[in-house]
Image: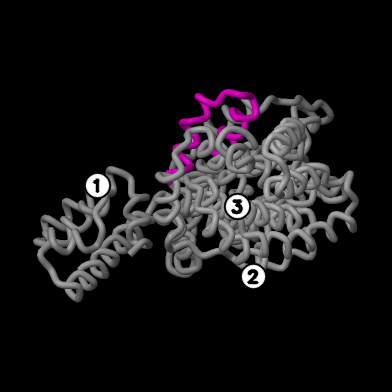
Amino acid sequence: MSKLKNIIKQLSDSDYQTIFSTLMDNSAEKSAMLLKYLKEKLLNDVKIMAELDVNPNAYYTLRSRLNEKIEEYLVRQMESPKTDVLKKVASINDIMFTKKRTIVLATLKKLEKELIDFDMSSELTVVYKGLKKLNVNTSDQYTYSQLYNKHIAYTLALDKTEDILAEYFKKFGIYFLTMEIELKEELTLLLNEVNNMARLYQSHRLFVYNCCISIFHKLCVDSETKVLNQKQEEIMREEITIEEAFEQTDMLMETYATDQNYHHLRIVFDFLKMLYLERNKAGKRSDKYFNDVNEYIGVFLSNYSLYTFPPLFLLSKIERDVRDHTPVAVLENYKEIFGDFETDPNDLPKAIMLNFYKAFTFFNAEKYEQCAKTINNILSEISMKKYQETLLELKTFLALQYCLMDDFELFNQLMSSIQRQIRMMGKKRVDHIVMITKIMKISLGVGGNRQKVTKIKLLCLKLNTEKIAHFSPFKYVNFKDELLNKLIL
């Protein structure tokens, strides 16, 4: 059921109205009303069955039929001008055998123009292959041979660029958890490869991919790296700002509005704009882009890891959840968004971050037992041998739950493991973890209350000034106010 709700939630207003009207016109009133209840009203299944006056079996059938109708509509929407061009490309061999040379030439030249407009280089090779054959007895054969070779090379370059993007964001996930210098250098090398590809070919698609990786790198990896280099002449290069990169990509996406790839990449650039504005302390302006991405969060987290690192959006959500103090609403929202969400167990950084978001959502709602259960699931189901800092962070976060639950036995068992790991890694490397363990030990200790209060307050004051480079749950835990009172009591 949650899957159907997520699909309906992601329908645009125009798509929703079209599907609703079609169902009503086809005398499928109950399906139409089910769509309306799921889109507009926050009703559970029992209340919807009562509203529709159907039994559970009929309700199940109704849901299945509605799901089929929506899927059929979405498939039909995939038809676009591009689809028509692809059909024409597929018929090139046929017309070369059945039409006169003049007609075939005119058809291929028209197709060439359309494919250039859509930046469909792979399909252009089919057109140039045909034009080569038709001009075997003329000097134009050489021209079309060169164009054929050029677009074969460009197609390979485009494929390679997409592969580099995927590799970059895969490595960034590991870098985000470990902050290893070697990985940072590898990310910079991958960035430079994409920069070079974009300079080599005059392609708006490569330009957009270059902006995608360059802006992200500037914001999340190296603030000293140039944003983007644009080829001006043979040797001259002009650096453009992030704002200019956004303006140019927006303009390209408007120019090629029918391009399905750009249609989907808009959410990536909304995410980048949100990150950019947040990094520049423009929180109010970033709200629009946050809401735009949040509306499609399930799809964004599932399907966009080849073009960005979606878990960063979850950390932004955590910061907002803590700031806005709406833990109960957030918990309900989590269940709705992730009820039917499947984590890829092979993408470890994303799996860790998704489960951490779930755990922190429980923590923020003061459901410490459920938070502890979620962290234990992470530790038992995900191998973190490569991510020792993250392992230590999550163990310490789990220990905090046991501390808040006054579970002395589990706390002491876990603390032994944490202290062994601290000794292996070195105290200086994990200063904040050492302070947090001290706070928890004092909190569960038996000493005088006044002494306990003084010690905990001093440690918390020092902890709040600590800067943590790598990923840590404690970047989002505020050791004052309500939490401080819980630790002191």
Other-residue count near label 2 (Cα within 10 Å), few / some / many at <14 / 14–19 / ≥20: few
Q: Earlier in the sequence, mark 1 or mark 2?
A: 1
Left or right of 199: which side holds 298?
A: left
Q: Quadrant of residue 75?
A: bottom left
Q: Earlier in the sequence, mark 3 or mark 1?
A: 1
Other-residue count near label 3 (Cα within 10 Å), few / some / many at <14 / 14–19 / ≥20: many
For marks 3 and 1, give the CA distance. 43 Å
Identified by mark 1, the residue type is Glu
Question: What label does residue 40 carry, if any?
Answer: 1
Query: Quick one: quadrant of the C terminus?
Result: top right
Left or right of 477: which side holds 36?
A: left
Residue 201 in view in this figure: yes
Q: Nearer the viewer, mark 1 or mark 2?
A: 2
Q: Position of residue 159 (x, y in %)?
A: 67, 56
Front-most of 225 and 255? 225
Give the color scheme: rainbow, by chain, secondary structure or one colour: one colour
Identified by mark 3, the residue type is Ser
Question: In this picture, which residue range is highlighted in magenta?
Answer: 270-295
For marks 3 and 2, give the CA distance. 44 Å
**Relative to 200, residue 73 above or below:** below
